[in-house]
Amino acid sequence: MADTSATTMLAFSILKPGDTEGKVTTVPKPVPQDGFALVRVLRAGVCNTDLEILQGYMGFHGVLGHEFVGIVESIGGNGKDVDELKEKWIGKRVCGDINVGCANCEICHETLDDKCCQMSRNHCPNR
């Protein structure tokens, strides 16, 4: 079992825009917002966008690996509702994609949230 008390984690990162080589770096471990989960990533996919970034077609810099599978490590916040989420989800295997639709527009209501014009990356503040 991984150390859940660690304050840092490893991440595959592009350090500056235009870099075509990624590096495994140590980064601060995020703290989940109230009702949000922190997932310990076990495996991450490499998609076409990741390849385009590594080929220099995009000016992205940051952590790669937005399609993943892992285990829920913690859930932020307190209270009865959050306690129920913690009991249900901590330790469970999950998969995810951090590209999340707004859940409010017509496109999302048609279950095409991957086409949402208001798509959020890295978090889902509208949900």
Image (cartoon, rainbow, N blue to C red):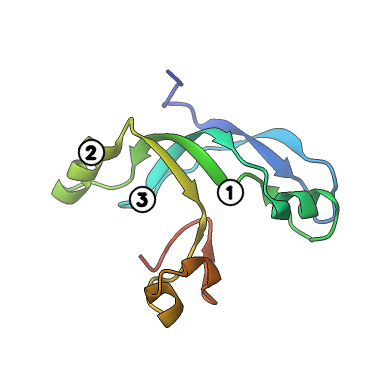
Nearer to us of marks 1 and 3 is: 1
Residue at x-position 85% and y-position 55%:
56
The dot on residue 92 is none
Residue pointed to by mark 2? 88
Residue occupying the point 79% across, 55% down? 52
Residue positioned 47% across, 57% down in the render: 123
- Write down the residue under mark 3: 36
Which residue is label 1 attached to? 66
Mark nearest the camera among 3 and 2 is: 2
Seen from the viewer's position, the closer of residues 101 and 86 is 101
Q: Position of residue 96 (x, y in %)?
A: 47, 47
Residue visible at 42% across and 26% down? Answer: 5
48 sits to left or right of 4: right
Q: Earlier in the sequence, mark 3 or mark 2?
A: 3
Residue 58 percent across, percent down from the top left: 79, 61
Q: What kind of element bears circle 3?
A: loop
Indicate which disc, 1 or 3, sits on the residue closer to the N terminus.
Answer: 3
| Cα gap from disc 3 to disc 2, whole angstroms | 13 Å
Q: Residues within 10 Å of mark 1 (few under 14, many from 20)?
A: some
Of residues 52 and 34, the one nearer the viewer is 52
- Which quarter of the figure is the N terminus placed in? top left
Q: Amino acid at mark 1?
A: His
Q: Is residue 48 above or below residue 111?
A: above
Q: Position of residue 14 (x, y in %)?
A: 75, 46
**Disc 3 residue type?**
Phe
Count of labels in the image: 3
Disc 1 and disc 3: Cα gap in Å? 16 Å
Q: Earlier in the sequence, mark 1 or mark 2?
A: 1
Residue in front for this viewpoint, 111 or 61: 111
